Amino acid sequence: MIFQSLSQLSEKIADLPEADMESTDKALKRDAVLTKPAGALGKLEEIAVWASAWQRQHPPTFEKPQIAIFAGNHGVCAKGVSAFPPEVTVQMVANFDSNGAAINQLANQYGASFSVWPLELNTPTADFTENPAMSEEEMLTAVNIGWKAVEAGSDFLVVGEMGIGNTTVASALAAALFGGTGADWAGPGTGVGPDGMGRKADAIDAGLKRHADILGDPLKVMQHLGGRELAAMLGAVLAARFKNVPVVLDGFVTCAAIAPLFKLNEKALDHCIVGHGSAEPGHMKLLQHLKQQPLLSLAMRLGEGSGAAVALGIVQSAIVTHAGMASFTEAGVSDQD
């Protein structure tokens, strides 16, 4: 799939495949006869049924999880919104490539395929306080990269990001899509203090004012206030829907990246669960708007897909218990009425 216009992308988001009810029914019937009291495995039971529905198969599998990381740089960093310079994005991509980051270790732990997609790191997006962050063509290029990054045969997808300044971008997207000021959404990100948070809030407010005429169009919000790595994550999560791959979402930046999908179609995230609630203050607020609850709360705020990757352990537990447990009949255990 190659998107050539925002209208084409919008049409795709409006016409999404639904969950497979036959697989859902099979999962529910199996869950009902496993050797446990009804509901005793709690959320694990729900995850197994959800995975079966969106993999469109029963039993669901956890054999080929995929982690895809997208990296981009942001012109708004010129406003002093980050504790680190944009060069760190390039350096961290090199760290990913050499297996040195936290996310590498988590990918290794779960046997996940791992890929990094640097998106024109030497050409940051435009400063959104002055101009649209991306042209329509630039945004669509990033969306298409994300779409293509989802591997055939993956049975779960984690998307993550690296981009100095992208918590400011995420906060701007959240404010544009769900209302509020820069101060309502800006957080410490990489560790800025009160002065840095003030600069972030001012930049967000300036961006909202500069682009006030497009705030009713979620995809234009991404184009004008977003970034390449966020647009790529949007493309990857959308592709996963069409490729029968359930998604485990990461923290604030990832959830802000896919928020335009939800604004255009409230069913667009039904194939997603949120791996963790991050320590970035805007994340839990954003999840309320997205009608999502995180699986874990570990005070993480690293990005990289790391919190979602930790949650893969919960997902794997759901799959192996659902697929491997004996039924009451198989175990010779009396079922209760």
Image: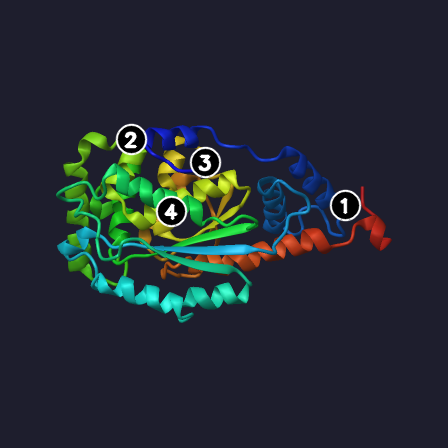
Circle 3 residue: 268
- For mark 4, does the 10 Å Cα neighbourhood hold few (<14), some (14 to 19), or many (20 or more) residues? many
**Going by the picture, which residue comes out furthest to the right?**
332
Circle 2 residue: 217
Q: Is residue 63 left or right of residue 282?
A: right
Residue contact at pointers 3 and 4, CB within 8 angstroms: no
Against 161, is 99 above or below? below
Residue 84 in picture, x, y percent from top left: 22, 64
Instruction: Name the residue located 81 percent from the left edge and 45 percent from the top edge.
Output: 336
What's the residue type where badge 4 is placed?
Answer: Ile
Q: How is the image coloured?
A: rainbow
Residue 243 in picture, x, y percent from top left: 53, 41
Give SS at disc 4.
helix
Q: How many marks?
A: 4
Q: Nearer the viewer, mark 1 or mark 3?
A: 3
Give SS at disc 2.
loop
Measured Cα–Cα span from mark 3 to mark 4: 19 Å
* Mark linked to residue 201: none
Residue 271 in picture, x, y percent from top left: 51, 41
Circle 1 residue: 33
Mark before the other along the chain sequence, 1 or 3: 1
Q: Is residue 271 left or right of residue 87?
A: right
Circle 4 residue: 145
Residue contact at pointers 1 and 3, CB within 8 angstroms: no
What's the residue type where badge 1 is placed?
Answer: Val
